[in-house]
Amino acid sequence: MKTLFSALILAILLSSYTSAQTVPTASLKSVAEAENSFADMAAKEGTRAAFLQFAASDGLVFSDKPENAQDNWKKRPVNATLLAWRPSWADVSANGELGYTTGTWAFSRTKDEAPVAWGEYFTIWRKQADGSLKFALDLGIGHDKADVVKDNWKSPTPSGKASGVKASENQWRALENSFSEALSKNGQRNTYEKLASDQMRLLIEGKMPFQGKPAAMSQIADTGIETRVLGGGASSNMAYAYGEFEQKGSDGKTEKGFYARVWKFEAKAWRVVAEVRHTVPPPKN
């Protein structure tokens, strides 16, 4: 693990520090409110209109590849389907410029019909030049039936004082490159055991969310996983990255897909606080 921790320590030292900060309550609420406004517009004006309104100009959605959200949704016709969702977990950087939300979604063929599919979404939010919040990334998973509950979101309990770390522009890249190297050399369980937050939230295809490190670790296989970082961002004491992954599933078959991971500086170290793994079905023969 020496290579991993040397790289992580270097990444931390490259950050510039200011006075101690805590997450402003108003900033945290603004992220959850942005998600709720996004969902409200989808219910009233349709999913297409909502995604076009709330996606950043460079925001991403995923199908068989990452795609610009604006381009993706402009190609889709207006229809009568309903995608309902609400945040159940939210967090934000100390400066309020970067945050994420996760929660249940439910899909109905029309607004008057019962849902026929459910899952969890994972959204990265970034503050824009005009002060508004737009999503930079939207990724999700499917799972069994679950209720979409409004006004019931929670956030991580502050873990000591964030030391006011100000992430460099490439903080996410340094963290992810070190993490990928550790995964390759030391395996998943050893790597996550060292670097996962006690409050980590994990979303895996086909399963309900796992909240807290013990629950998340119960799903981290002691097998190799290959990842390829495609992009990310950072602000203040938070960073995120997304990319491709490939690993052996419990049935021995190869699983491929996309991941997004959020890092946060907790007290004295960068930790993985949230992650989603979206498995892409193999092509049909």
Image (cartoon, rainbow, N blue to C red):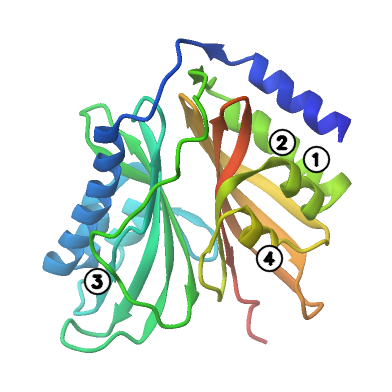
Position of the C terminus by quadrant: bottom right
Query: Is mark 3 in CB contact (under 8 Å) with mark 2?
Result: no
Amino acid bearing label 1? Glu
User: Does 17 appear above or below 48?
Assistant: above
Which quadrant of the view contains residue 246?
bottom right
Instruction: Say left or right for 92 vs 190.
Output: left
Residue bearing mark 1: 181
Residue bearing mark 2: 177
Residue 66, how many percent across, how many down? 50, 54
Residues at marks 1 and 4, CA–CA distance in whole angstroms:
20 Å
Amino acid bearing label 4? Gln
At numbered mark 3, what does the secondary structure look like: helix, strand or loop? loop
Looking at the image, which is closer to me, 263 or 242? 263
Neighbours of disc 1 within 10 Å: few (<14), some (14-19), many (20+)? some
Residues at marks 1 and 2, CA–CA distance in whole angstroms:
6 Å
Q: Residue at 52% of width from left, 29% of height from top?
A: 160
Q: Residue at 36% of width from left, 52% of height from top?
A: 154
Label whose residue precedes the other's in the sequence (3 or 4): 3
Neighbours of disc 4 within 10 Å: few (<14), some (14-19), many (20+)? some
Amino acid bearing label 2? Asn
Q: Nearer the viewer, mark 3 or mark 2?
A: 2
Instruction: Say left or right for 199 vs 53.
Output: right
Instruction: Say left or right for 260 vs 282.
Output: left
Neighbours of disc 3 within 10 Å: few (<14), some (14-19), many (20+)? few
Residue bearing mark 4: 219
Residue bearing mark 3: 77
User: Does 218 appear above or below 132?
Assistant: below
Query: Is mark 1 in CB contact (under 8 Å) with mark 2?
Result: yes
Neighbours of disc 2 within 10 Å: few (<14), some (14-19), many (20+)? some
